Each structure stands twice: as structure tokens, then as C-alpha cells.
Image (spheres, grey):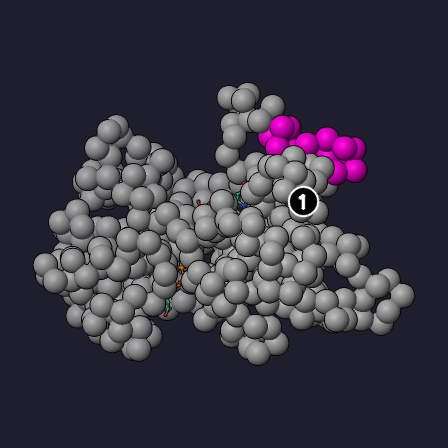
Amino acid sequence: MKICVFGAGYVGLVAAACFAESGNNVITVDVDQAKIEGLKQGIIPIYEPGLKELVIRNQSEGRLSFTTDIEAAVKASLISFIAVGTPPGEDGSADLQYVLAVGRSIGQHMQGYKIIVDKSTVPVGTADKVRAAVQAELDSRGVGFEFDVVSNPEFLKEGAAIDDFMKPDRVVIGTDNVRTAEIMKELYEPFMRKHNRMIIMDIRSAEMTKYAANAMLATRISFMNQIANLCERMNADVAAVREGIGSDSRIGYDFLFPGPGYGGSCFPKDVKALIRTADECGYEMLLLNAVEEVNELQKHVLARKVLDLLGDSGADKPLAGKTVACWGLSFKPRTDDMREAPSLTIIEELLANGAQVRAHDPEAIKEARKTFGDRISYSTNQYEILSGADALVIITDWSEYRNPDFERIMADLKEPLIVDGRNLYKPDRMQLAGFRYIPLGRNG
Ligand code: NAD
Ligand code: UGA
């Protein structure tokens, strides 16, 4: 099939490469000239495992191309995917300016029937707005081409994006048109090898499904973070509690890991946007207000622990003279994405209290520099930052932190203190090894 994808970001680039991999002819369009020029030369603007190889192979085999020429891309394709950003506006609602701009561009250039697929995360009712934007352009051109607008939200996770796209748990298609549903089924057929995972529904329900899924996952995390905080106070072990409740198949084990709060480009913005959507129709999402509030508080928990353990409570800058080594800057492993990363809050709080901060991250240092500049020091060697530090704080669960050289950590740290925001180690073993180990929601 002939497809064009608007937006060469995480979602657009992954979708474009995966559709090309399954044999389609895909043109990726972006307004960012530098990004497109880079992509033409095989330079991938984000770190996502497996993406570079996929892009380069499909590009060299002629199925995947990159352009800023919107007109040519629209004219050459039957299906246009919209995968541009929907960042939060000032009031938290999703800013639809980029989505609607793409709708207008399609209306300006289409020359016959088109399927316009909304893959960006957008509030209920957006398909109607896209339809109106396209129709207004057709009207002003005085042409009457037919088109359908489809909602096809994306559920991929950064760091596992290719796998999630190629082997999806489900593909949700919101459409009011049987013919369009058939074409979308055909397009996704190659990703349904084992069994059919297509769920066809009406457009508004598809738009809502995306927000409900992210809000549900965010709710699980905030719930578990509160349970962890309570476990600490009650001398219980959240890891055991997770196993105890996760074994109930109605609950399941996933997304019940306590941590320094959820981050990333999606959970925080989508929870806010759903709260705003409800506001607009006079309904209050009481539960989601709490989910958000708990998450904001949770981002301070690790820095608070360091303050309690190392701080001089009488001093103006309680952590003056202390050096804190941090493992992990990105909001999660296997990505360089720093958007809404808990490390941003934690490190700012440590700095505000006078600490010197050194940080390690395998991929996100370039991104982190944009926020912290020279206010902290960086290394891509996880041990280099430990020498003479008063504590090690683990913020992100990169796999290289799971089984590190504990002898080296013990030798390098000034104090053998580890504050672990991801519960990576066994507390009894850490104690035996002589560490002062402070996990989340369990006894150190
Ligand atoms: P991104 O910011 O990484 O990329 C968006 C791209 O769109 C940018 O390259 C930008 O230059 C381009 N763009 C903006 N206006 C354009 C236009 N008029 N024409 C062509 N290109 C244009 O965004 P992302 O992380 O890929 O997210 C895109 C959407 O998908 C959002 O709604 C997001 O919520 C949703 N989503 C993201 C993820 C994720 O893991 N990042 C997962 C599922 C859904
Ligand atoms: C999330 C969803 O998982 C995807 O399904 C969705 O498509 C995407 O948002 C989106 O809409 O953009 P992502 O943000 O890439 O994907 O990352 P997750 O793996 O979901 O992690 C989000 C945050 O939750 C991270 O900060 C992570 O550390 C935290 N988390 C996750 C926990 O604290 N505990 C857990 O048990 C799981």
C-alpha cells in the first residue's frame, strides 16, 4: 500500500519503518528540515533499539523515504497517518495545532479519495475536528473529494517500540466505515500472524481507549507508590506485597513496581489531558487528580531520603559539602528521552540543598545537558562518578545497574550508602556486603 506518515518522531518513525518492513511503500514527512536531511543519511534523531537498522534497510531497499515535500507525499499515498506531537497546552489540555495543521495540508493537496488516520494521542472529538479542517480546505478549493478519518491510537513503549509495533497486544481501529475498516485490516494483517488482535470500534471510543489505557497504567503506578510508602512506615515489604497481589490473575504482575514517580512524554501529559477533557464536560476525574498529585509527591521521595540520611538539618544548605552520585537520567531504560524524567526533580532538589551531583547514563547525557548544563558532572562510565561520593542514588533501572561490581562500589564510595529508587538488589545481601542500603517500600 502507499502510505505517508506525518511526523518523524518516536511514533511516526517507528510506524513508518515497520509498515515499510511489511512491504508497503512509505513516505515520512516532517517539517523539521534538519531531521529529514539527517534521516536521508541514516542519522536517527532518537535512541531506540533496532530502529536504525530497520530504517537503513528499508530505505536502501526503496520502501522508505523521507521528505519535507508535503504535496508530493499526499499525492503519492492512499493512507496518510498523523503522528505529530500533541503537547500539553497551558491548561493541561492536548494542543491540537500540529494535528490540525496536518489535516489542512492534506486537504490542500489531496487529488482523490484518502484515508486519514490519527495515530497521535488526541482527545475524544478530534477526528471530527480533523474532518472539518480537511473539508474546509476542499471547500475553499471548490473540489469534492471523498475521505475518511480513522482513529488508530498507538500503544508502543519507548525502548521496546519496534517489538510493540510488530507484535502488538492489540490494534485499535476507530471508524464508522466498513470499507475503511477492511483496508486498515489489510494493512495490519502482517502484524497479526499468531491470531487476530484487531479491535474495531467507533471513532470516539477509540480516542477514549488510548487515554483510558495510559490513565489506568499511571493509576497502578501511583497506587503502588503509595502502598510502598505505607509499607516503609509499617515495616512491610512491597516486593512481597507485589507478588502477593500480582498472583491474582485479575490484578497481574505488570506495572506494579514502585519507583521515583512515572515520567516520560505520555503518562504525565495524558493524565492531565483526560482530567481537562472531563472538566470541559463538567465532570471531575477525582481519581486521576489524586494519581497526578501522588506522582508529583513521589518525585521528591528519593531526594528526601538523601536529605534525611546525609543532611545537616540546621544548615541553610543541608547537603553542602556532600557529593551524590546518580545512576540513570532518562525517564526509563533503553531511551535517551528526558521528558518529565523524575531525575529532573531529584537532581534539582539535591542541588538546591547544596549537594554536588555527578551523573551516569548510557544514553541520555546529551539530553540532560540541555537542562543541567555544567551544574552537574557527567560520565558514561558508571563507576567513574563514585569515587569519594557520599551516596549513590539509583534513579533509572538500566540493566547495567542490576548486577554491578559491588566490591568496586564499596571501595569507591566514601560512605557505603545506596538509595535505590528501583529496588534492584536484595536487602539482606546488601547488608551482608556492608552497605547501608535504602530501597523503596522495604527494609534496607
Ligand atoms: P515527537 O515530538 O517525537 O515527534 C513529532 C514530530 O512531528 C516532530 O518531528 C515534528 O517536527 C513533527 N511535526 C510537527 N508538525 C508537523 C507537520 N505539520 N507535518 C509534519 N511533521 C510535523 O512525538 P512522538 O513522541 O512521536 O508523539 C507523537 C504522538 O504520538 C503524540 O500524540 C504522543 O502522545 C503519541 N504517542 C507517543 C508515544 C511515545 O512513546 N513517544 C507512544 C504512543 C503515542
Ligand atoms: C507508555 C505506555 O506504556 C505505552 O503503552 C504508551 O503507548 C505510551 O506510554 C504512550 O502513550 O506514549 P512509555 O511512556 O514509553 O509508554 O513508558 P512506560 O514503560 O510505560 O513507563 C512510563 C513510566 O512509568 C516510566 O517513568 C517508568 O519508570 C514508570 N513505571 C513503569 C513505574 O514506575 N513502575 C512500573 O511498574 C512501570
* Magenta highlight: main SS: helix
Q: Relative to the observer, which residue lies in front, 166 or 258?
A: 258
Seen at 41% across and 67% down, the residue is: 98
Seen at 31% across and 44% down, the residue is: 163
x, y percentage for residue 21?
18, 50
Q: What residue occupies the far left of the structure in this picture?
A: 61
Q: Relative to the observer, which residue lies in front, 411 or 145?
A: 411
Side of 44 relative to 310 (left or right): left
Q: Is residue 321 above or below residue 168?
A: below
Q: How many marks?
A: 1
Q: Residues within 10 Å of mark 1 (few under 14, many from 20)?
A: few
x, y percentage for residue 395?
58, 54
Q: Relative to the observer, which residue lies in front, 80 or 26?
A: 26
Q: What segment is highlighted magenta in the picture?
A: 230-242
Question: Can the viewer see residue 248?
Answer: yes
Q: Which residue is mark 1?
A: 434
Secondary structure state at the residue bearing disc 1: loop
Question: Can the viewer see residue 87?
Answer: no
Seen at 40% across and 45% down, the residue is: 155
Q: Is residue 442 above or below residue 415?
A: above
| Rendered-image quarter of ligand 1 | bottom left
Disc 1 residue type (three-letter): Gly
State yes or no: residue 231 in magenta.
Answer: yes
